[in-house]
Amino acid sequence: MEPDPYIYPLFLGPYGENDEAFERILLEFLRDHIYWRRNFHPEDPPAIPTLAARGEEYERFIARLKQVLHRLSARLKHSVPFSSPRYIGHMASDPLMPGLLAQMITLPYNPNNVVQDAAPVTVELELEVGLQLARMLGYHVDETRPDCPFGHLTSGGTVANYEALWVARAIKYFPVAVAAVPELAEALALRDTGDHALANLGTTAVLALRARLNGHLAGLPDPDRALLASALDASRIEHQGLHAFHQQHPELLPPRVLIPHTAHYSWAKGMKLMGLGEQQLLEVAEQGMRMRLDALEQTLEALQRDGEDVLLVVGVLGTTEFGTIDPIDEILAARERWRERGLGFSVHVDAAWGGYLASMFRDPAGGWLPREAVGRDHDRFPSEAVYRAYTSMGSADSVTVDPHKLGYLPYGSGAFICRDQRMMDLVTQDAAYTFDAQASKTSSGDRSRFLALGHYILEGSKSGAAAAGVYVAHEVVPLHAEGMGRLMHHTVRSAERFHDRLQTLGRDLEGEARLVVPVVPDTNLVCVAINPWDNEVLADCNAFTRRVFDHLAVDKARPVQMKEFFASYTSIDPEALGLDEARTLLASLRLAGDSFEADGSSLFVLRHTLMSPFLEDPLNGVDYLERYCTYLVELVRRELAALGAGRDPRTRG
């Protein structure tokens, strides 16, 4: 592999190679901040006397501060070295230097992105970040249109997923609330439409209904308009709560949310938080860690037959355990088919992990690159299914994406994106519709109302410095194939190379241990299962792999310098693989075919997240993946010897 100079200035570096540039830039802008303070009414005298630094109490305080900071610094030395190419564990890496610097430079200004008055600069940056991400994901961004996408930052993907539930519920039940006000039902011809039909209109039809409502109310005298708006607010599920709303509308059963088996645990937490209940969460069967469309169709068929509604179907673009990608294009097509059959629901794409890989597919001019161009320097990526999934995302109702994952930004920076900014008007903490200036802004596509950001989102006070970091990173490393996509290329290429090397590693261990990659990676996560050669018991296989993992886990009791490499782990159960693939996996490991059923357990596997672009260092002739593979073989043999299983491979099965 040839050196790629593009990646060299992107990070502080595994060895701190860019320390000089980092320090120089940081000091320059820290001084710039000090000058900014001094130039705000320079006629004001300094509040802290010049001689204060010579005072005894002052000196004691500074000494105490330095002492505590030294203790903190010493404790931080036990942190995980995410910046090193020897770390291939969880979804963390060295943050991009542009984003890190921008966030640090903005911190002394301490902007609070809850509202423009507290953050006149960084709220605008956050709204721009939302549009940057929307463009990358394939949404058609035109700020002059009322249906322009909207996006904002969250503390992480978990909150973004909560917000998807929140927004989807507001959209689903808004028509029901409108029809519950007799005057509005009459004016909008909803009187003869049942609650079930109203709750299944779909996002586009709901937003069209709201536009008609705005038009009707705008023509009424102010007192009548205010009276009807108040009545509508009182009829909404957000005001009444779940119990009272469903009592008033007995035709409606509590809605279901459909997720793949491998979906993130935040969906179960979100259902509890929203009061919907975890039992309303249905897992759709999978095959190879990817949602099965036939299983989705069967589930929807059964729900419609039983008179149940669906709030949301979630597709995952890069599972956190395996990096696998659901058939997003087919899920979106199912949404349209079932809407025509009277079962309307929203589709959310949880792209917390895989969202930034979309940059590989984006032409710098703004279009989608052909599949052949995306995969030009790859062995398998992207498959036809993966390509279709990415290029269809612009039709999803909403998307979660995490800048603090494959965006290489500091924690916590998640993001929520929706395809039509008018969706957010249904969840505003203020009245959901002000029918004068606000209505004209909404209809013209003016997004200035979102400068009061805290009124439209789940969170209140939030870091403006994080928004500055993401914005600057995107500006310096643009979200297309020649920018961020170039960084993504290194990570995916490493995963392909690692996957292939593990195949030969399995042959190297023949007669000693069986080493199997259970799922061909869609992205840049690679898992591996290990079983002693003559073992047929799942519990013993898991115990052995755990012993191997102990050498790769974080150990706070030992200096990090004593660790050779860091990896992570996850578990595989048959529901995620599908019955046939689960049996194939067990057979490849020579485990009993009924192991999952007999043990009631899952398979413990090593998990590797290949984020570092420095895993292969052609200039110095260092290949960290090759070193890791050598080390992994050493660990396997060491643990086999400890078990007394390493005596003579020829005596084993």
Image (spheres, grey):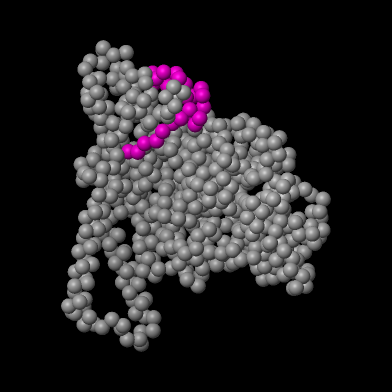
Give the residue at x 71% y 56%: 177
Give the residue at x 25% y 32%: 631
Q: Quadrant of residue 148?
A: bottom right
Q: How many marks?
A: 0
Q: Can the viewer see residue 147?
A: no
Q: Is residue 74 above or below residue 307?
A: below
Q: Is residue 230 magenta?
A: no
Q: Is residue 213 above or below residue 329?
A: below
Q: Is residue 291 above or below residue 459?
A: above
Q: Is residue 589 magenta?
A: yes
Find residue 310 and report its horizontal and vertical position in percent: 64, 43
Decide if residue 242 is on the left or right side of residue 532. Answer: right
Find residue 592 and report its horizontal and vertical position in percent: 41, 18
Q: Can the viewer see residue 266?
A: yes
Q: Quadrant of the C terminus?
A: top left
**Highlighted range, magenta:** 567-595
Between 304 and 590, the residue placed more toward the observer is 304
Q: Quadrant of residue 111?
A: bottom left
Find residue 37 and report its horizontal and vertical position in percent: 36, 77
Q: Quadrant of residue 551?
A: top left
Q: Quadrant of the N terminus?
A: top left
Give the residue at x 48% y 43%: 265
Between 565 and 47, the residue placed more toward the observer is 47
Give the residue at x 33% y 40%: 88
Find residue 328 and report its horizontal and vertical position in percent: 57, 39
